[in-house]
Image: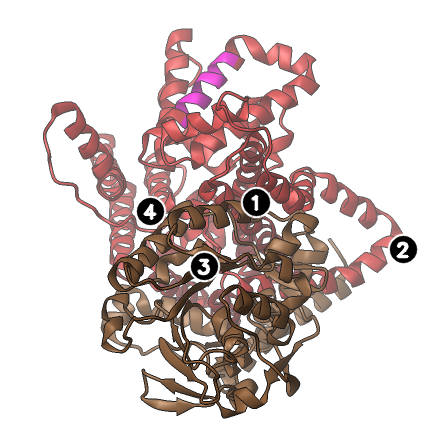
Chain colours: A red, B brown
Amino acid sequence: MVFSSISFLYYFIPSVVLLYFLSPDRFKNSVLLLASLFFYGWGEPRYVILMLATITQGYVFGILIGRSHNRKRSKIFLTASVLCSLATLGCFKYADFFIENFNRVTGLSLPLLRLALPIGISFYTFQILSYVVDVYRRQVPAQKNYIDLAVYVAMFPQLIAGPIVRYSHIAGQLKGRSHSLEDAAAGIRRFLTGLSKKVLLADTLGQLAEAFRVTKEQSVLFCWLYAAAILLQIYFDFSGYSDMAIGLGRLFGFRFPENFNYPYISGSITEFWRRWHMSLGSWFRDYLYIPLGGNRVSRPRWFCNILLVWLATGLWHGAAWNFVLWGLMFGALLVLEKQWLLPWLKRHPVPGHFYVLLLITVSFVLFDSPDISSACSVVVSMFGGGKLPLVTTESLYYLKSYGILLAAGLIGATPLLSWIRKKIQACGRAARIWNGAEPVLLAGLLAVCTAFLIDGSFHPFLYFRF
Amino acid sequence: MGGKGNHILMVILIGGMLFGFCLWSLLKAPDRESLTERRQLSAFPEMTKEAVLSGRFMNDFENYALDQFPLRDSFRSVKAMVSRYGMGQKDNNGVYLQDGYLAKLDYPLNEQSVSYAARRFAYLYDRYLAGKNMKIYLSVVPDKGYFLAEAGGYPAMDYRALFHSLQAQMPYAEYIDLLPYLELSDYYRTDSHWRQEKIIPAAEYLAGRMGASGLRDIQIVSLDCPFYGVYYGQMALTPEPDQIFYADSPTLRACSVYDYETGSWLPVYDLEKGTERDPYQLFLSGSRPLLTLENPNAKTKRELILFRDSFGSAIAPLLAESYQKITLVDIRYVSPEILDKWICFQDQDILFLYSASVLNDSVTIK
């Protein structure tokens, strides 16, 4: 089930909210777990068991690690749990990629597994991994209540597209949390902001990107329109989902970590990755980069660590060479910045912003393309190297048809609207008007999103495949 | 952020919408069809173990929830208005509004599709027509985009290239150019088709080029109900509906229509269909694979075989004056390989009359 669907908004959410708030506190986690299993099973009925098995191994090994006073023995349990998690992930997500490439290199023809990718497997596997590692590091006690651990992993707001929540972050909230009208209102506000980003901006811009993919009349202008469309689509899709997840979490009394902080205003790639998919970045930092030695090693080793982390980041996003290249591209850029560019970028913020936007745009063309050669073809054409006409009637039409939306998207990707809202909040009379108008505005947005859902059928969540 | 009043209002308004529409959806009797979209709406899916495990039930349920949502048509209109006036989008679901006319984005020219259609026509020629000294004509009906697209900055297929391509691939047919006799107002505002009462000059010209004459003593009769064309539902905006008129005459009143598919006689204008979901089916009862329009008062024994799509339904009666029999063949619904079971190809005039939009998406031609 996806958040941007009628069945979620008008059947699932009302039912779950009603059950949840009518239940006594001691049953609230059970209600959330059952709702989450139903939510997951709605899209992946066969893989509910796989997810429960993953949770169970995390639970059992967590207990074993927690009970073990022998460091060596707890390391064995940790290794076993990590291997279980990675083997599951490897089997379902990466096996065919490696078999294909093995066959290509060796000339053999080993059969592919052709397993369907379980939705959200990368997210919930990483949550289990962080949990057992944190238990091993004695940063958190092992969770003895299976339901509480299962709620941590499977909670539907963040189950299939993050943010990647650390157990340490919500362990206390799993045990007991408060609910308030303010939390409910804040959760609703955040959820509807995310829903609007997703339905009104990301999905509509996705149609522009789709028009480019199927066109028979490419042009330089169309290549740029496509690149701008996916730049904004990916951001609004993913940050919209994160907003919805954080908002739903808040409604049920949880505080999830932020995942985006206006990444497109960054002045360097280093800054961009501090603002984009922050929960993934910090996960790799804490569970891979620092254990590898981080920057407290020799300079060549440090750079190797960075490249390794970004190779893993690329692969996390997908089992394909364009994702590998995408990750390595960022690894290389980060190395370049750390070695030479950062001081210059700090002194020259304007070209710095252009540099970031240009490279991020190119990176998302690579990210979105089915293979590396298609991505290269688009990038080359963007800079006039594809022998394409500068404009066509079709590309001009799409520029006119999507111009307002692209401009709105660009403004929406900056903190401008948030800044305006804060200014209004700070001004007494305007704040009073805003406080009355905001719920009406959000109700209107919900109605418009519903209208777009009813009339359209183009609502893929890009981050579902991860 | 916000005060207590803001929080209360937020929870009441949004909660009210979510719970209200949830209850309304659950309690409302399901609708069977959408009149504006001219289609059956999804019914509640059957819940079986196989359907649930395969995920089919869930997909079908989402379709059901979408189709049966309360105020569905109003929501679709809201979407169309926000897209057009809020986001500045030039089309909604591929349909655009220009100068009061709804038209479909139909581009680019699909050369392969045109060639496929030409090959199927060549098959008809080789199998039934070649070497029989029959007069063969070809004409293409442009869609509204021909008149609207360029002025509005909408992309459109290269119509000239389409006409030339088809002519070049059908050297056995004499091309009749209808463009000088057509203009935008000859089409319905909300539908893809042309208006019969407006194409009388085009029909006269067509008949004249085939050595025949157009319909005489025409009386234009209006049908007293609004016509919501096929684009009306797709666009979801609410322009004024069209009105259907038809051309009646003493000749047509004496004509009869035989439907080979059902083996029954039909009226030239089925007025009951004029009040149904697709009123354009008034003309020769809509999509039929094989019909004959017989004129007992014809002054000659000439016959016409019209290979056609739905545009042919409106123009065929206007050609009835000089022909004793017009056979209408729609090879989207009948295989061209078995036509000789019903038609003896001999001495008739032959007219291939197809719309640009069907030629550009000819996959339905058999």
Going from N to C along the chain, the mark reached first, 4 or 2, is: 4
Q: Which residues are the magenta region?
A: A326-336
Foreground mark, 3 or 1, reads: 3
Which chain is disc 2 placed on? A
Kindly indicate whether the residue at mark 2 contacts the one at mark 4 (C-beta within 8 angstroms): no
Q: Amino acid at mark 2?
A: Arg
Q: Amino acid at mark 1?
A: Phe
Name the residue: 68% across, 52% down. Answer: B87
Q: Is residue A47 left or right of residue A206?
A: left
Mark sitting on residue A429: 2
Q: Is residue B79 left or right of residue A335?
A: right
Amino acid on which the number 4 mark rests in the picture = Ile
Image quarter in which the C terminus of chain A is found:
top left
Three-letter code for the amino acid on which mark 3 is drawn = Leu
Q: Mark 3: which secondary structure?
A: strand
The residue that mark 1 highlights is: A236
Query: Is tag 2's residue or tag 1's residue first in the polypeptide sequence?
Result: 1
Q: Earlier in the sequence, mark 4 or mark 1?
A: 4
Q: Which residue is mark 4?
A: A121
Marks 3 and 4 in Cβ contact (< 8 Å) = no
Residue A290 visible to an observer of this rendering: no
Secondary structure state at the residue bearing disc 1: helix
Mark 3 to mark 1: distance in Å? 51 Å
- For disc 3, the marked residue is B138
Element under label 4? helix
**In this rendering, does residue A200 appear at all?**
yes
Say whether mark 2 and mark 4 are on the same chain.
yes
